[in-house]
Image (cartoon, helix red, strand yellow):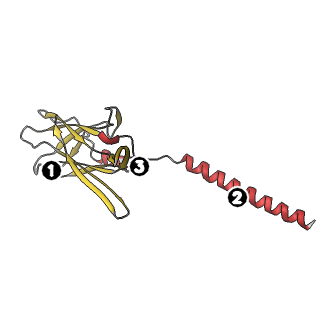
Amino acid sequence: MVQYAFSFKIKQALSGGVLFALLLGFAACQQTREYSSSDPGVWEQHAIKNALPDGLLHGSSYLSIYSEVYSQSEKRTYNLTATVSMRNISSTDAVYLLSAAYYNTQGDLIRTYFDHPIALKPLESIEIVVDEADEHGGTGANFIFEWAVAPQCHEPLFEAVMISTSGQQGISFTTQSVKR
């Protein structure tokens, strides 16, 4: 009788542990992974409430980023975090960003970050962070920015800083946009 009670308690404990592990596993599967650390509230804070001013000059810029780079061979890659900085270099005029679209190595659209014009005040900067775990972009990812400025205003500047660390090793480098 004692043997049976002891055996029953062990089975009960094991089945409870297995059940807990299964529930924990299912909970982990249900978590959605965000791959971009840009806060959607930032886009709303900068949204243009009225129509864009008349007479603006429109342009487009290309920015290369690297969500991963090759390491030791073309069969092994190393993931990077990319901080994309959108900068208004004018000290007097606002610049207007019409879209920010992220493309992968094959040229396929991965995501857009806002679907309405936003304004950057003079000398203001905002960022998009492409997380290190985001492998969607690949080794040849890029952004296309559509923008508008007053005729006498400087074009916006788009830069990216790619960085990663592992143990005591680190890698970092930058890229700058080109007008299309």
Q: Amino acid at mark 3?
A: Ala
Percent across and percent down for residue 155 are: 13, 42
Whichever of callouts 3 and 2 sits on the residue coming sooner in the sequence is 2
Q: Is residue 76 left or right of residue 96?
A: right
Q: Does dot 2 land on a helix, a strand or a loop?
A: helix
Looking at the image, which residue is at 12% across and 46% down? 93
CA distance for labels 1 and 2? 59 Å
Residue furthest to the bottom in view is 2
For the N terminus, the quadrant is bottom right
Q: Position of residue 145 (x, y in %)?
A: 23, 38
Q: Which mark is residue 35?
A: none
Residue at left 56%, top 47%? 29
Residue underneath mark 1? 122
* In front: label 3 or label 1: 3
The vertical placement of 74 against 13, above or below, is: above
Q: Quickly name the residue at label 2.
A: 17
The residue closer to the viewer here, 79 or 101, is 79
Query: What separation in Å lies between label 3 and label 2 (alpha carbons)?
Result: 31 Å
Lower sequence index among marks 1 and 2:
2
Q: Which residue is mark 3?
A: 133
Q: Residue furthest right?
A: 1
Q: Amino acid at mark 1?
A: Pro
Residue 175 seen anywhere in this rendered image of the structure: yes
Q: Is residue 36 visible?
A: no
Q: Residue at x 73, y 57 (%)?
A: 16
